[in-house]
């Protein structure tokens, strides 16, 4: 006989794992369903070669208009590849949302053991950039991280999984949920939510070649800013998927004669004041040289086959990162994108976005030059992103309790954001998911 569940939770990123952990703590029977596999590997070669960043055609995920969209499909979702930044959103954004998350944010900071990066982990080039910013009247603050710096080896490879067990990921919450009795289906894609008379009745999923029909009265979709609206549209909520925002970012680089960011922890500091004052998240950044090569030459090269990517990687190792300084800035881009029911993504960079990214580039440039970069060497990369959001927004597709028009069908991930954050969103997603779990526990007990 089919096992009964109080909740089916779809997706195991910050949204899904949090809801599963909180619900099972009060003895709710939960089944977690995850599209991807459990990966224990770490490192550029292993994660880079896996399918986690890829779409169904095995390409790195891009919008039809060619903006790279970072998101990982695996147990833990994008938390596995996140940089460990755990930034609290400014009050201005939460006021805009009309949601009080203060208690849940406090609880999230505790669960993720958020702490400021110690001074000794801030590399010399980052410190040089901080001094450059300071000379312009801008103070760089140490970034709050969900990283245990007693374990961190400062390898700077967070994006390819933490091999030292220092970075928090949702694997911790998933383990808690399973200890409390949750079940987990891996490598299983939820296609749609079934419903009758306006109420959720279960999900239809695919595992390999098999279709699975599962029954429950409550489904929480947490398949991320891209995954959730696909499922919603295939479940007759046709308005989902509109208003996609990505927190688009761009990196400005410049060469100096004496210092570079090679092997430093990136995003170690950030311009906190600019978040409120300019709606920009600016921070020292220099990721693997492959990205420099990819994006400074030909953006489409990200869609090359493996052989050509490896060739490009070898070529890019010639980039002199011992002399390269970088600053990235995320913006709160306009909500103009759309995720289609078949998974295609439309997202352009609007004139407003371009102007904002231009403003960001000017700030980055001034800071880098003040830090010692040679003005004639300054260049910037193409547009990138890693925070898909707002595709099933509160006030549009879901109500204030994160429930859709189908009773018993809830959303709890970045797609629920009413407006883009423009800062690292994990802490906010965890807080929002705690809020939903509290609501479910109190209203259904
Ligand atoms: C490289 C990188 C670095 C980042 N660094 C940071 C950082 O330092 N700090 C920060 O705050 N944020 C960071 N982010 C962003 C952050 O990781 C994401 O915003 C966050 O993980 C989104 O959480 P989520 O729960 O909305 O979705 P996700 O984390 O995307 O999780 C969704 C899950 O659902 C699964 N899924 C999708 N479709 C289906 C389906 N049909 N059926 C079943 N399962 C499905 C996916 O496989 C995935 O596991 C980073 C992102 C990237 C890509």
Image (spheres, rainbow, N blue to C red):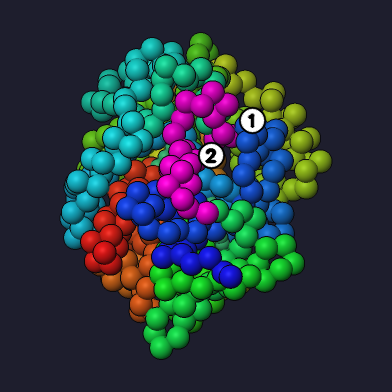
Residue 300 seen in render: no
Check residue 43 in the rendering and tell me which mark sits there, or answer none.
1
Q: Considering depth in this image, is 232 or 123 the residue closer to the camera?
A: 232
Chain part drawn in magenta: 159-183
Local secondary structure at mark 1: loop
Relative to 256, say whether 15 is above or below. Answer: below
Is-magenta flag for residue 338? no
Q: Please report the residue visible at 69 percent of the width from the left and 23 percent of the height from the top.
A: 318
In primary-sequence order, the first of circles 1 and 2 is 1
Relative to 331, say whether 341 is above or below. Answer: below
Q: Considering depth in this image, is 17 or 444 the residue closer to the camera?
A: 444
Label 2 CB-ligand 1 distance < 8 A: yes
Q: Position of residue 194 (x, y in %)?
A: 51, 78
- Crowd band around label 1 with a 10 angstrom C-alpha radius: few (<14), some (14–19), many (20+): some
C-alpha separation, residue under disc 1 versus residue under disc 2: 10 Å
Q: Considering depth in this image, is 328 or 161 the residue closer to the camera?
A: 161
Check residue 81 in the rendering and tell me which mark sits there, or answer none.
2
- Crowd band around label 2 with a 10 angstrom C-alpha radius: few (<14), some (14–19), many (20+): many
């Amino acid at each position: 006989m089919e096992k009964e569940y109080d909740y089916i939770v779809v997706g195991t990123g910050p949204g899904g794992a949090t809801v599963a952990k909180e619900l099972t703590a009060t003895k709710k029977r939960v089944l977690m369903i995850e599209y991807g596999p459990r990966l224990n590997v770490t490192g550029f070669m292993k994660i880079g070669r896996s399918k986690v960043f890829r779409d169904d055609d095995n390409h790195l995920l891009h919008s039809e208009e060619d903006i790279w969209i970072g998101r990982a499909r695996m147990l833990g979702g994008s938390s596995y590849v996140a940089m460990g930044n755990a930034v609290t959103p400014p009050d201005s954004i939460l006021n805009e949302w009309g949601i009080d998350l203060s208690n849940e944010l406090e609880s999230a900071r505790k669960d993720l053991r958020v702490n400021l990066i110690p001074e000794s982990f801030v590399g010399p080039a980052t410190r040089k950039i901080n001094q450059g910013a300071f000379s312009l009247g801008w103070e760089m603050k140490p970034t709050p991280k969900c990283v245990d710096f007693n374990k961190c080896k400062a390898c700077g490879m967070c994006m390819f999984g933490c091999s030292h067990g220092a970075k928090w990921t949702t694997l911790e919450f998933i383990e808690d949920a399973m200890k409390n009795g949750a079940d987990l289906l891996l490598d299983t894609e939820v296609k749609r939510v079934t419903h009758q008379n306006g109420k959720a009745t279960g999900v239809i999923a695919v595992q390999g070649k098999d279709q699975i029909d599962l029954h429950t009265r409550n489904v929480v979709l947490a398949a991320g800013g891209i995954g959730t609206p696909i499922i919603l549209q295939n479940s007759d909520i046709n308005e989902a998927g509109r208003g996609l925002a990505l927190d688009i970012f761009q990196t400005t680089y410049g060469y100096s004669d004496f210092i570079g960011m090679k092997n430093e922890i990136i995003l170690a500091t950030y311009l906190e004041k600019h978040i409120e004052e300019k709606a920009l998240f600016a921070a020292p950044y220099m990721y693997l040289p492959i990205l420099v090569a990819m994006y400074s030459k030909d953006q489409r090269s990200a869609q090359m086959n493996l052989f050509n990517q490896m060739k490009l990687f070898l070529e890019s190792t010639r980039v002199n990162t011992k002399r390269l300084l970088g600053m990235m800035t995320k913006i709160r881009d306009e909500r103009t994108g759309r995720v289609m029911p078949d998974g295609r993504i439309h997202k352009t960079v609007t004139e407003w976005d371009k102007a904002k990214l231009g403003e960001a580039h000017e700030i980055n440039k001034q800071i880098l030059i003040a830090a010692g970069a040679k003005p004639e060497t300054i260049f910037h990369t193409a547009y990138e992103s890693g925070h898909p959001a707002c595709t099933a927004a509160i006030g549009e597709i879901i109500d204030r309790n994160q429930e859709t028009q189908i009773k018993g069908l809830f959303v709890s991930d970045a797609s629920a954001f009413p407006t883009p954050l423009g800062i690292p969103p994990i802490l906010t997603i965890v807080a929002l998911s705690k809020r939903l779990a509290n609501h479910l526990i109190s209203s259904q007990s």
